[in-house]
Image (tube, helix red, strand yellow):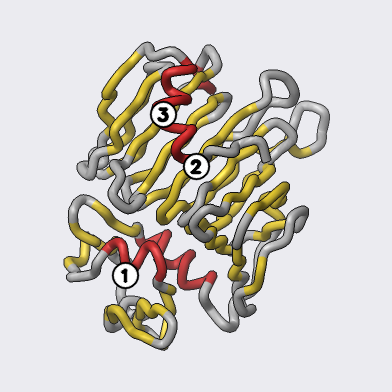
Amino acid sequence: NGTETSLQAEDLLGGADAVRLGDDLVFVAGARELAQIPNYFAVERRSFDDLDLGDGLSLSAAMVHDLAESFSITGKPGDLVAVLDALSGSVTVKRPGLPRRPATAGEELLAGDLLEIAALSRVSLRLSDTTRIEFGGRARLRVDRRVLLPAADGRRRLASVELTLLTGAFFARTAPTGPQPPVISLRTPLGTLAWSDATLGGQILMPGAPDLLAILGRAQGATGIITLIGTQGPQAITESPALVALERSGRARVIQALMTVRELDATLFSRLLPSRGL
């Protein structure tokens, strides 16, 4: 069930902290309280609600709980999820139980870490030996978790990585050779994008810009499928290359298919991340 609120999506997703105060959920920006939802965490409730932010945007109950953990003063970080390979500009990290601090290139990011990337700044995260994902300025993202499964040789392999992107631009790429890449799950207020073996990027809630997904290439076979899991269920995006609109209804609509990689690069990625060579 969705909880109707009068929350402003841009204010909450772009700069507010989701804080648990007793049983209440409070969104604060600095010393200013933006919104309060009484008894959201009350133990007598059998289930928690997704937060309807209006205009087709929402935070799932799982996303709310994860964000509240990141901003908790008593929370504890989890296991290693990613490595911050490189950064440019101003980037801060908020770890559960600790104050904000400047991020540093080469540091390990743990489950629960939240990155805030200032305008004209960017970061590159290494998720596995074959998978990188970059985020442009004004992005807010949470490093959620990764899943390891037994491999044929008796060791464990990285099966999936889960991230949360509240707002901002991203660009993901997978090396053409090497170990099997993990499935990437990117939770957003428009739904969850999941992929593997693909080169793609997009923008979510960027000021004055549409919500878009651009697909440069994907591998042949099932692992190359890109899926959007929105309010209307999962939708496979099979066109590649393609420029896709991420609609507030939780669906994806292809704007232009069969573009050349050069056209897509000039249309979207050069604007989102003009210096991708981190």
Q: Is residue 49 above or below residue 168?
A: below
Q: Position of residue 143 (x, y in %)?
A: 58, 55
**The disc label shown at residue 170, or none:** 2
Place residue 51 in its image quadrant.
bottom left
Residue occupying the point 42% across, 38% down: 202
In-image side of 92 versus 215 (left or right): right
Q: Which residue is mark 3?
A: 214
Residue at 28% in and 62% down? 9
Q: Which residue position is annotated with label 1? A: 46
Alpha carbons under labels 1 and 3: distance apart? 39 Å
Crowding around mark 2 (Cα neighbors within 10 Å: few <14, some 14 to 19, many 20+) is many
Residue drawn at (62%, 50%), measured in percent from left and top?
123
- Amino acid under disc 3: Ala
Q: Earlier in the sequence, mark 2 or mark 1?
A: 1
Q: In this rendering, would 116 be left or right of 110? A: left
The secondary element bearing badge 2 is classed as strand
Q: Secondary structure at mark 1?
A: loop
Q: Position of residue 221 (x, y in %)?
A: 52, 14
User: 272 above or below 70?
Assistant: above
What type is the residue that disc 1 sits on? Answer: Arg
First in sequence: mark 1 vs mark 3:
1
Residue at the image position 43 percent from the left and 74 percent from the top: 17
In the rendered image, the quadrant that contains the C terminus is top right
Residue 153, numbered label: none
In whole angstroms, how far apart are the C-alphas of marks 3 and 2?
Answer: 10 Å
- The residue carrying pointer 1 sits among few (fewer than 14), some (14 to 19) or many (20 or more) residues within 10 Å by Cα, namely few
Q: Amino acid at mark 2?
A: Phe
| Figure check: 206 above or below 278 | below
For the N terminus, the quadrant is: bottom left
- Closer to the camera: disc 2 or disc 1? 2
Of 14 and 25, nearer the camera is 14
User: Are the residues flagged by discs 2 and 1 in contact, CB closer than 8 Å?
Assistant: no
